[in-house]
Image (spheres, rainbow, N blue to C red):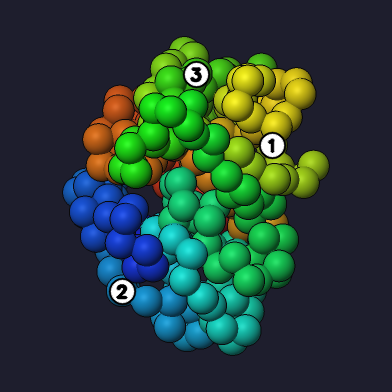
Amino acid sequence: MTQKRALVVRGGWEGHQPVEATELFLPFLRSNGYAVRVEESTEIYADAVELAATDLVVQCVTMSEITREQLAGLTSAVVAGTGFTGWHGGIADSFRASSDYLHLVGGQFATHPGKEPCERRGAADDNFLPHTITLTEAGRAHPVTAGIEDFALDTEQYWVLHDDLIDVLATTTHPTRPWQPWHRPVTSPAVWTRRWGAGRIVVTTPGHSVDVLEHPHVRTIIERGMLWATRTASGS
């Protein structure tokens, strides 16, 4: 059997600890039979030969920029069957200036609502709110999330703009609060999959910091997402 190949691409905003976060998952990939290559920039995406031989891309690149050639290489690889996955800003808040990247992943971070203004102290946890990740009916049956119950987190709660071509496995709801401008609760996808050509995409929005990634449900979802997204022989 040919060994599976995983490409881990990391970088961008250091606040999401791209090195520490991705290092957390390297042993899982290797123990599941992947040959792992780690790159510190998106330059590798322009290497069509390398990406064609890659079964899974794990991306952790918040914000940053991507060239037209790099994005074309990534998109072509996914269309041909390479899996694509990641968590939090490393996939859902990457390359803000690229509408084509948004088209690929199907959802984009818009904001993470914060605490009441009088409670904010100028630290990262100003944007930490207790919230629930709620499994959808589809999520309760999907291999990535089956058997996982709804769970609570106290961290950034992503508000996501998205299209209808994603399959939502879990959601989170932003309630109305007196200091916020919206007038009714808003539900955002928290975990979703997307089929793009022959490729599979999995996005998990929790994962602001290593401690969140170590939450057993979050970690399980991300790890199962890696396995599910990996190129399949049938391409289905």
Q: Residue at x 55, y 68 (%)?
A: 95
Residue tagged by mark 1?
167
> In this view of the protein, which residue sits in the foreground, 195 or 168?
168
Q: Rounded to the nearest whole Å, what is the CA distance between mark 1 and mark 3? A: 19 Å
Q: Helix or strand or loop: what does disc 2 sit on?
A: loop
Q: Position of residue 148 (x, y in %)?
A: 45, 17
Q: Residue at x 51, y 85 (%)?
A: 46
Q: Is residue 182 visible?
A: yes
Q: Position of residue 49 (x, y in %)?
A: 48, 84
* Vertical side of 14 occupied by 205: above or below: above
- Quarter placement of the N terminus: bottom left
Q: Residue at x 39, y 27 (%)?
A: 119
In this image, 98 relative to 94: left or right?
Answer: right
The three-letter code of the residue at mark 2 reads: Glu
User: Which numbered disc, 2 or 3, marks the residue closer to the eye?
Assistant: 3
In this image, 17 relative to 171: left or right?
Answer: left
Q: Rounded to the nearest whole Å, what is the CA distance between mark 2 and mark 1? A: 30 Å
Residue tagged by mark 3?
132
Q: Rounded to the nearest whole Å, what is the CA distance between mark 2 and mark 3? A: 33 Å
User: Which numbered disc, 2 or 1, marks the residue closer to the eye?
Assistant: 2
Residue tagged by mark 2?
40
Q: Residue at x 57, y 44 (%)?
A: 111
